Image (cartoon, rainbow, N blue to C red):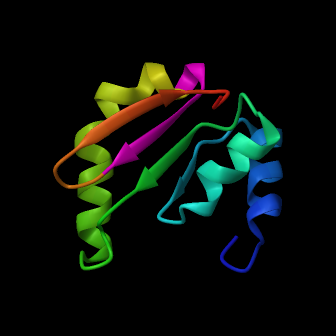
């Protein structure tokens, strides 16, 4: 999926009932434009300076707290210092 476009990733996640994990702010915007209720997205913010292992640790540390939200349909904005949840569809 590294070379896939945002719409291709979006459609793949919807079809497979997957959660998209991205540092790309375009993906939540795509959800809003489509008024979509899925897929859930974890939007990693302020992580450019972190190593991939640190990204994984950040996700794993927060996943138990947001699993039910992700199953419901949300955008979870996650940074090293903050977690915010926004229900889908984005209005």
Q: What stretch is highlighted in magenta?
A: 71-78
Residue 9: % across, % down: 74, 59
Work out whether residue 1 or residue 31 is closer to the camera in this orientation and state it: 31
* Furthest residue in direction left, as rendered: 81
Q: Which residue is drawn at 28% across and 39% down?
A: 83
Q: In which quarter of the image is residue 8?
A: bottom right
Q: Relative to residue 13, is residue 62 drawn left or right?
A: left
* Furthest residue in direction front, as rendered: 91
Q: Name above or below for residue 10 compared with residue 88.
A: below
Q: Relative to residue 77, is residue 89 drawn left or right?
A: right
Q: Name above or below for residue 61 compared with residue 46.
A: above
Q: Relative to residue 33, is residue 85 drawn left or right?
A: left
Q: Residue at x 63, y 32 (%)?
A: 90
Image quadrant for the C terminus? Answer: top right
Q: How many marks?
A: 0
Residue 56: % across, % down: 32, 59
Residue 80: % across, % down: 19, 55
Residue 73 is a magenta residue: yes
Residue 74: % across, % down: 54, 30
């Amino acid at each position: 999926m590294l070379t896939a476009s945002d719409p291709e990733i979006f459609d793949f996640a919807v079809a497979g009932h997957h959660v998209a994990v991205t540092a790309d702010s375009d993906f939540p915007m795509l959800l809003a434009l489509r008024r979509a209720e899925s897929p859930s997205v974890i939007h990693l913010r302020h992580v450019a300076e972190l190593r991939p292992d640190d990204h994984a640790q950040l996700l794993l540390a927060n996943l138990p707290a947001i699993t039910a939200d992700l199953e419901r349909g949300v955008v979870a904005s996650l940074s090293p210092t903050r977690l915010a949840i926004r229900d889908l569809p984005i209005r």
